[in-house]
Image (cartoon, grey):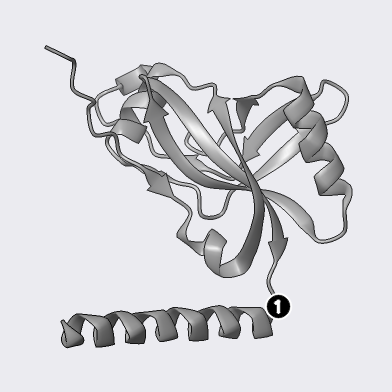
Amino acid sequence: MAKKEQSTPVIQNRKANHLYFVDETFEVGIMLIGSEVKSIRDGKCTIGEAWIDIDEKKNELWLVGARIDEYLFANRFNHIPARRRKLLAHGHEIEKMRKAKEQKGCTLIPLKLYFKNRRAKLEMGICRGKDQHDKRQTIMERDAKMEMDRAAKAHK
């Protein structure tokens, strides 16, 4: 009998789609310690205020501003909730991200944090900021889509 995939909690950055246009996404690994992994599995993590920084000298990615709350049962071996965490990516991906970040108005934002084959993964995107007009346009498109869905459901 095949092993069942366990449902893993997905921590999403809901503000990202409202504040940014996502041009391209990448899946990267994240270096965590044991109590951080357990805390993420409990869903005690926020990435809404986080961003990704590139260390140009060492060619490394760092997750800054993410908060993983302390694990309740880890006692003295607990972690620091708001520390920087190293991200694991291929060199050519880091180079592509660096070139994109040098463009005006582009930034690297975490979109999702999840588990894949028992490993913590972070989906990040190369994003451009939205203007107020763009935000209103997105809201109008979403409302129009909801109205069409309601009409289609009522017509059935």
Q: Is residue 65 left or right of residue 152?
A: right
Per the image, the residue denoted by label 1 is 131
Q: Nearer the viewer, residue 127 or 15?
A: 127
| Amino acid at dot 1 | Asp
In what element is the residue under mark 1? loop
Rendered image quadrant of residue 41 = top left
Residue 4, given in percent of the width and then of the height, sits at 18, 22
Q: Is residue 68 left or right of residue 16?
A: left
Quadrant housing the C terminus: bottom left
- The answer to whether residue 137 shows anywhere in this view is yes
Residue farthest to the left?
Answer: 1
Residue 23, given in percent of the width and then of the height, sits at 68, 54
* Residue shown at 43% from the left, 86% from the top: 144
Residue 63, given in percent of the width and then of the height, sits at 62, 37
Residue 94, given in percent of the width and then of the height, sits at 76, 30
- The answer to whether residue 79 shows anywhere in this view is no
Q: Nearer the viewer, residue 87 or 28?
A: 28
